[in-house]
Image: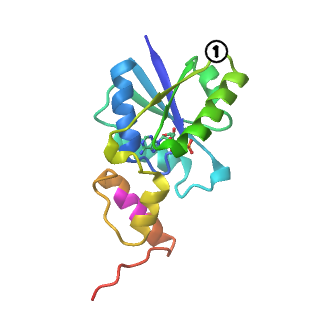
Amino acid sequence: MKKALYPGTFDPITKGHLEIVRNAVRIFDEVIIAVAEASEKKPLFSIDERVQLCKESLTSFPKVRVAKFTGLAVDFAEDIHTYTMIRGLRAVSDFEYELSLALMNKNLNPKIDTIFLLPDSDYLYLSSSMVKQVIQLGGSLSKFVSPNVEQAVLRKYKTLGEYHEPKKD
Ligand code: ADP
């Protein structure tokens, strides 16, 4: 059984992430989405909210399960005996960071290999932070996130009192 771990912050999960998962399930029998606590990145959503949004967005993928972890992804990989990691590569700007992360992970645990997958070109410049910014400023993003995620981002900014109502003229 070929298993792979797809670790990330997923704050929140976008259609770019989903595209990587769609490609990964063609290669692996089981894909584990591992949501990192990543408190140092000050995520908008709590880890449990991010896990829930991933689960809701992934109901049509039977070979995928969602887990959460704190600390190093390599330690979590060791805990669940899964030594292939998946990461997504967008534009060239991702490359340097992703390469150093993959090399560091291999240093920390030589059993770990990282496989890079590409999204569809529609999602090449899509990031969770861009999604949050656009929704916060009143834009609609149904092309880039699932409806549940769009609603959740909107609700979150409204609850925080940080939603900027779009101007009507
Ligand atoms: P992290 O904070 O670990 O980078 P992210 O949730 O931002 O977590 O991303 C997890 C992985 O998914 C990273 O490898 C990132 O490059 C990839 N990824 C994010 N958005 C996209 C996208 N639109 N297309 C392809 N890969 C993506």
Q: Which residue is drawn at 63% across and 46% down?
A: 38
Query: Residue 112's image quarter?
Result: top right
Residue 121 drawn in magenta? no
**Extreme-front residue of the structure:** 92
Colour style of the rendered protein structure: rainbow
Considering only vertical position in the picture, is 156 above or below 118? below
Image side of residue 163 versus residue 71, left or right: left
| Residue under numbered circle 1 | 111
Looking at the picture, how far across and down is residue 12, in whole percent? 46, 51
User: Tag 1: residue type?
Assistant: Lys
* Residue 135 visible in rendering: yes
Q: Which residue is drawn at 34% across and 84% down?
A: 167
**Front-lying residue, 145 or 91:** 91
**Front-lying residue, 20 or 33:** 20
**Extreme-top residue of the structure:** 1
* Residue 9 visible in rendering: no
Q: Which residue is drawn at 41% across and 51% down?
A: 126
Image side of residue 153 versus residue 168, left or right: right
Q: Residue at x 32, y 27 (%)?
A: 62
Which quarter of the rendering shows the N terminus?
Answer: top left
Considering only vertical position in the picture, is 71 above or below 53? above
Q: How many marks?
A: 1
Would you say the magenta stretch is mainly helix, strand or loop?
A: helix
Which quarter of the rendering shows the C terminus?
Answer: bottom left
| Numbered range of the magenta stretch | 150-155
Look at the numbered disc 1 and give the secondary structure of its residue: loop
Packing grade of label 1 (10 A; few <14, some 14-19, many >=20) is some
**Front-lying residue, 118 or 39:** 118
Looking at the picture, how far across and down is residue 80, in whole percent? 57, 21
